[in-house]
Amino acid sequence: MKRAYGGVVIDDAGRVLLRKPAGLHKTRVWTFAKGKAMPGETAEQTALREVFEETGVRGKIIRRLSPDELGSQDEFFLMTPLEQTGIFDGETTAIVWATQAEADDLISMTEDTERRLRDLKILRLAYEAVTSLRGLPAVPPTEA
């Protein structure tokens, strides 16, 4: 199985960027941008490209989220936004900037248990990373 690489973009106000993928039926799913590498691309280049293509947000990588803690083949990077173009590809129907609590609620709408739990874990790890980088008190995680 080929790995996918993605980004969790959190702005200075502490809001996280989520996207609503196209082509999903009978479910409302909010998730993070990710995709497969093109020939010659690094994991970081892939994550930056996918975030830009799927959300219209140009990001800067702050750090890699621990793949061991994710328990997934996919890898994610914590990013900060540099530019928001307002233009994204056809793989996305909408984007939203959400607080951690709002993102938790949006991700929790995902009916696929494995994807829901994976994205909630990615969300928690990203906010833990931001908290440690900024030296802020941690927000207790909600129950999945």
Image (tube, helix red, strand yellow):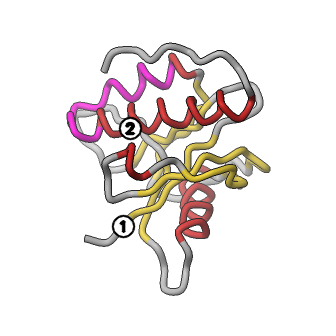
Q: Magenta part of the protein: which range?
A: 102-115
Check disc 2 and give the amino acid type: Asp
Quarter holding the C terminus is top left
Report x, y in % for residue 6.
50, 55
Quadrant in the rendering for residue 29: top left
Q: Earlier in the sequence, mark 2 or mark 1?
A: 1
Secondary structure of residue under mark 2: helix
Amino acid, disc 1: Arg
Which numbered tag is attached to residue 119?
2
| Closest to the observer, 89 or 104 | 104
122 horizontally vs 114: left or right: right
Looking at the image, the residue that sits furthest to the bottom is 40
Question: Which residue: 65% across, 33% down?
Answer: 130
Residue 32 shown left or right of residue 117 in the figure: right
Looking at the picture, does residue 49 appear above or below residue 17? below
- How far across and how far down the image is residue 90, in percent? 48, 58
Instruction: Measure the alpha-carbon separation of dots 2 and 1.
Output: 16 Å
Image quarter (top left, top right, bottom left or bottom right) of the N terminus: bottom left
- Of 28 and 139, nearer the camera is 139
State left or right for residue 110 relative to residue 107. left
Q: Is residue 110 magenta?
A: yes
Residue sitting at 47 percent across and 45 percent down? 32
Q: Nearer the viewer, residue 121 or 4?
A: 121
Name the spot of residue 9 as percent of width and height, x first.
62, 42
- Mark 1 residue element: loop
The quarter of the displayed image where residue 105 is located: top left
Q: Which mark is residue 3?
A: 1
